[in-house]
Image: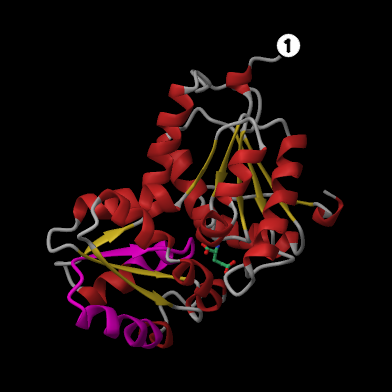
């Protein structure tokens, strides 16, 4: 039987955004293999109902099961908010999302107990960050702001465009007037706008990138379960990418996020799972 420690980690997102989480996993856990699935045919999840996001997430988890992954990372804030709790009960391998690690570090960082969270309609509307932060400290005030225009701007590659800064400024104005000292980048695309956000909020506000914290939590989870990979098998390229549509567009974008050229992504008919 194959050693489970050598099995890959399954990571999924509604599209390309989850690659910001993959990037952190690669940095923090360089010996781990990864199978990534981006649901490029059905993105965005952020404007869909819980029922739909749960159905999509279940299909992806079934697909990742066929890849014999040893653990799963839900690298999408929306799917973490809408589907993680249910799926956790349905599978027998460890699974984590990006929300709990992000909430934990925000609760630790805030000094004035005022935390802002930006994300999709679904994530902010679910109030999940508020719930998890207040479980840690009920006195922390959590102020959410959905920013639906940011995902398309990032996907268009307009990271250094004044239009993106204008949109961001308009979204953040309200949060800044609430005197938050910590801001959660609660959508997988937003870490790519980190320097734009930093410019607008100044040095006083702590920025929380849940992707980074998730990679740390994943390492802990693998060690606790005795399934961390202790060494690379050198002969094999350790990363595989799957999408539900537009594989070429995905590889182009992926190559701008990851520290190497992603040469191919395989298209999967996810509705079959
Ligand atoms: N990946 C999603 C998230 O982190 C953003 C894109 C979408 O709406 O699907 O919430």
Q: Answer whether residue 58 is magenta in the image.
A: no
**Residue 66, located in which quarter of the rendered image?**
top right
Residue 77 coordinates in the image, percent (x, y): 50, 59
In the image, 58: left or right of 86?
A: right
Residue 186 coordinates in the image, percent (x, y): 41, 63
- Vertical side of 180 occupied by 265: above or below: above
Comparing 242 with 119, the one in front is: 119
Name the outermost residue toward the top: 1
Q: Residue at x 23, y 53 (%)?
A: 137
Residue 270 coordinates in the image, percent (x, y): 80, 54
SS state under label 1: loop
Q: For ligand 1, give the image quadrant.
A: bottom right
**Residue 161, located in which quarter of the rendered image?**
bottom left
Residue 187 coordinates in the image, percent (x, y): 46, 64
- Vertical side of 25 occupied by 44: above or below: below
- Give the total number of marks visible in the rendering: 1
Comparing 240 with 174, the one in front is: 174
Q: If the image is split into quadrants, where does the N terminus sit?
A: top right
Q: Residue at x 28, y 84 (%)?
A: 174
Comparing 148 with 16, the one in front is: 148
Name the outermost residue toward the right: 272
Q: Which residues are magenta?
A: 166-194
- Vertical side of 83 occupied by 201: above or below: below
- Vertical side of 93 occupied by 159: above or below: below
Residue holding disc 1: 1
């Amino acid at each position: 039987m194959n050693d489970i420690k050598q099995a890959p980690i399954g990571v999924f997102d509604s599209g390309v955004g989850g690659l910001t989480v993959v990037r952190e996993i690669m940095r923090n856990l360089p010996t781990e293999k990864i199978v990534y699935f981006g649901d490029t045919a059905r993105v965005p999840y952020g404007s869909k109902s819980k029922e739909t996001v749960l159905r999509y997430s279940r299909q992806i988890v079934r697909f990742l099961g066929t890849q014999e992954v040893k653990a799963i990372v839900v690298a999408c804030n929306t799917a973490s908010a809408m589907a993680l709790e249910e799926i956790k009960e349905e599978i027998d391998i460890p699974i984590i999302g990006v929300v709990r690690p992000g909430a934990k570090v925000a609760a630790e960082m805030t000094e004035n107990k005022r935390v802002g969270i930006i994300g999709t309609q679904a994530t902010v509307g679910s109030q999940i960050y508020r719930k998890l932060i207040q479980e840690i400290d009920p006195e922390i005030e959590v102020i959410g702001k959905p920013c639906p225009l940011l995902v398309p701007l990032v996907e268009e590659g307009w990271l250094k465009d004044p239009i993106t800064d204008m949109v961001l400024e308009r979204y953040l104005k309200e949060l800044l007037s609430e005197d938050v000292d910590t801001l959660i980048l609660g959508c997988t695309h937003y870490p790519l706008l980190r320097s734009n956000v930093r410019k607008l909020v100044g040095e006083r506000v702590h920025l929380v990138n849940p992707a980074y914290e998730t990679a740390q939590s994943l390492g802990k989870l693998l060690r606790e379960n005795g399934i961390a990979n202790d060494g690379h098998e050198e002969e094999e390229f350790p990363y595989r990418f799957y999408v539900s549509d537009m594989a070429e567009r995905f590889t182009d974008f992926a190559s701008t996020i990851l520290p190497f050229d992603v040469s191919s992504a395989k298209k999967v008919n996810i509705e079959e799972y």
